[in-house]
Image: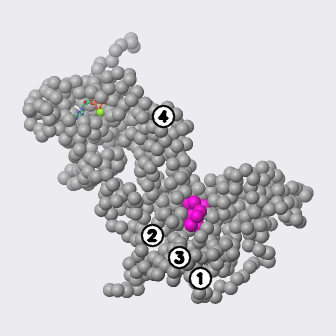
């Protein structure tokens, strides 16, 4: 075949192949055009999964009659004029490709009436054939109708799925777009049925839209993020680790208000959560990155779903750090009880209006108890005499909650209250003025230890204790080898160890946190766990597997009796420990039952 220039119509159809993959792609292009036109109200009608009809109606700036033919021709845009403009795009569209592409694979009709002209006008394209402009009645704004999508490209048509599937794609898309602009009203109809109705919301009342898109619980189970560095800002809401989901279906990223699926950004989030998420769970989040458009290339993907950052490393670190900080604050004094059910217990400061406020930890409940009464040394309701196991000489220097540390100041109300008793050797029962606090002592202690180990690990000198007599640990040959191979890691944590033979290890120094513990058993367990690595459940969450394992194996295990002062010491440690609302595997460490909840349980006051 000779080389020849392809006819325009075919060129458009080829271009359409890249941009218009399915009905939802058409909706995306049309709604983005509406947003670019300054619309505050966008209504989408869909018939037969979008293959029959897609109609997008907006109240934006409109297109003047003379420009209608231009709008549907290739490479025609009002959004950029030069390379400079391309480098700092602030609109969603900029290629001048969408309308001609759609027009080449469907029956397209545009009716528009700009505010500055007296009458409206319309133009149609029928599979590439243009029907010239003529006057038409229309309120200010634009309506674009796309009928019989892919009627002239059977190959494409074959890839279109069932009507419900295609409509599902459209609905998800509208939800994403609705999260990108809270100030715009979005409506979606499937035939006669109104399926999505999201009125514009004022700043600070975003929960209404969240409820529409992510469900009512999201607003009550997230923490706000807002952090800037130079020309870059990240804001939004990230789900509490304990509210993580089985699917990654509630993860939304917007870069300069454009919804993207960016690997780099998603990876930064994953990294920030890795220490607090239960294995295999997915965080929910809605995040907005705003930066100078010059720092990001939006012309990097045919459907503009990905972007390229000029300095991707920096953006990644910025996002990671901002989220890590926000998640570190998930400790008892700021956020909701991590095991929170559906009751709204966390009040997002960014969501002020309209939300039903329920008691937070710092809000006196309806029957506030006298603070002094609740924090006095509680009487031993169920006798829990001190009982030390295994003949350990003393509580470790901070490893085990040390009794003498606790000097309860009678006037202070601690978020986690004061301990009352231990339940079945597993849970600590405590009371604060709001009601009952329940703590999983192993999970909580594990997090406390893990955070301490990490902090020490990052310090210059790990706090470690010299042993007058070395401890000799009997292991299997390959276990000794594994430890010696990893010696630097053990040393950085505060161990000083040597092989005494192929199956014996001498410990001369141990981390201060372990002093007084059954170090032999802990070392054996850690080595075994690291050996099993992949299947060891307790390695899932921890960013640092070694430290996570060490913390897990050192933490008080079930059926260890704790005295009330020891329990109180643990509660106080939790309150000052970052990420203390969840253990290293992302499970909640504590929850509570408020007095109103208890009253309800007992049908009191009805
Ligand atoms: N709903 C609308 N309201 C007002 N003007 C519109 C609307 N839709 C399209 N236009 C005008 O038509 C032009 C062409 O639209 P088209 O979507 O083809 O290209 P674009 O948005 O500029 O770039 P891209 O191909 O990246 O979307 C736009 O630049 C805009 O001026
Ligand atoms: Mg466009």
Q: Using the image, tell me which numbered label, if any, was put on residue 309.
A: 4
Query: Disc 2 vs disc 4: which is toward the camera?
Result: 2
Q: CA distance from mark 4 to mark 1?
A: 57 Å
Task: Specify the quadrant that holds the N terminus.
Answer: top left
Q: CA distance from mark 3 to mark 2?
A: 15 Å
Q: Residue at x 27, y 43 (%)?
A: 50
251 w.r.t. 141: above or below? below
Q: Find the magenta span and give its range.
A: 574-586
Q: Earlier in the sequence, mark 3 or mark 4?
A: 4
- Residue 274 at what x, y percent from top left? 57, 53
Q: Using the image, tell me which numbered label, if any, was put on residue 411.
A: 3
Magenta-highlighted stretch: main secondary structure?
loop
In this view of the protein, which residue sits in the foreground, 585 or 416? 416
For the residues bearing labels 1 and 3, Cβ distance under 8 angstroms = no
Q: CA distance from mark 1 to mark 2?
A: 21 Å
Residue placed under numbered mark 2 in the picture: 362
Residue placed under numbered mark 1 in the picture: 377
Task: Specify the quadrant that holds the C terminus.
Answer: bottom left
Q: Earlier in the sequence, mark 4 or mark 1?
A: 4
């Amino acid at each position: 075949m000779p080389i020849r220039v392809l006819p325009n119509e075919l060129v458009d159809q080829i271009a359409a192949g890249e941009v218009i993959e399915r009905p939802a792609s058409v909706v995306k292009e049309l709604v983005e055009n509406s947003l670019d036109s300054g619309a505050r109200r966008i209504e989408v009608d869909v018939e037969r999964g979008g293959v029959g009809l897609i109609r997008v109606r907006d109240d934006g700036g409109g297109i003047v009659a003379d420009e209608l033919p231009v709008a549907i021709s290739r490479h025609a845009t009002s959004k950029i004029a030069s390379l400079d403009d391309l480098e700092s795009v602030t609109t969603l569209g900029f290629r001048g490709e969408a309308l001609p592409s759609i027009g080449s694979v469907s029956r397209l009709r545009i009716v528009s009436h700009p505010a500055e002209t007296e009458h409206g006008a319309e133009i149609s394209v029928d599979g590439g054939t243009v029907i010239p402009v003529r006057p038409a009645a229309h309120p200010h704004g634009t309506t674009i109708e796309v009928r019989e999508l892919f009627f002239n490209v059977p190959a494409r048509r074959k890839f279109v799925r069932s009507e419900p599937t295609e409509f599902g794609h459209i609905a998800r898309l509208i939800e994403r777009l609705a999260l990108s602009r809270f100030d715009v009203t979005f409506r979606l109809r499937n035939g006669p049925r109104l399926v999505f109705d999201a009125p514009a919301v004022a700043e600070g009342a975003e929960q209404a839209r969240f409820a529409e898109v992510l469900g009512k619980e999201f607003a009550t189970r997230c923490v706000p993020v807002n952090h800037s560095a130079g020309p870059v800002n990240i804001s939004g809401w990230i789900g509490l680790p304990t509210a993580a989901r089985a699917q990654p279906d509630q993860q939304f990223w917007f870069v300069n208000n454009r919804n993207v699926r960016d690997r780099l950004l998603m990876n930064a989030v994953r990294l920030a959560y890795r220490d607090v998420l239960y294995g295999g769970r997915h965080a929910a989040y809605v995040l907005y990155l705003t930066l100078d458009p010059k720092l990001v290339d939006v012309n990097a993907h045919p459907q503009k779903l990905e972007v390229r950052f000029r300095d991707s490393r920096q953006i990644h670190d910025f996002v990671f750090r901002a989220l890590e900080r926000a998640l570190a604050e998930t400790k008892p004094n700021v956020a909701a009880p991590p095991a929170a059910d559906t009751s709204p217990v966390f009040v997002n400061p960014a969501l002020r209006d309209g939300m039903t406020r329920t008691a937070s930890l710092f809000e006196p409940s309806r029957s506030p108890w006298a603070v002094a009464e609740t924090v006095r040394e509680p009487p031993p309701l169920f006798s829990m005499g001190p009982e030390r196991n295994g003949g350990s000489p003393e509580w470790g220097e901070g490893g085990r909650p040390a009794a003498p540390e606790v000097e309860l100041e009678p006037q202070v109300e601690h978020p986690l209250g004061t301990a009352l008793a231990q339940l079945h050797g597993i849970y600590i029962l405590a009371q604060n003025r709001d009601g009952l606090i329940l703590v999983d002592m192993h999970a909580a202690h594990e997090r406390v230890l893990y955070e301490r180990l990490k902090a020490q690990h990052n310090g210059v000198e790990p706090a470690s204790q010299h042993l007058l007599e070395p401890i000799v640990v009997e292991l299997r040959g390959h276990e000794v080898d594994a430890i010696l191979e990893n010696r630097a890691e053990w040393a950085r944590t505060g161990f000083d160890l040597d092989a005494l033979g192929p199956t014996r290890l001498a410990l001369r120094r141990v981390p201060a946190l372990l002093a007084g513990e059954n170090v032999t058993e802990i070392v054996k367990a850690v080595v075994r766990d690291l050996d099993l690595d992949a299947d060891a459940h307790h390695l899932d969450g921890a960013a640092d597997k070694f430290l996570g394992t060490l913390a897990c194996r050192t933490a008080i295990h079930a059926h260890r009796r704790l005295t009330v002062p020891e329990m109180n010491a643990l509660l106080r440690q939790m309150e000052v420990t970052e990420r203390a609302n969840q253990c290293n595997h992302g499970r909640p460490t504590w929850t509570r039952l408020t007095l109103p909840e208890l009253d309800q349980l007992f049908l009191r006051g009805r």
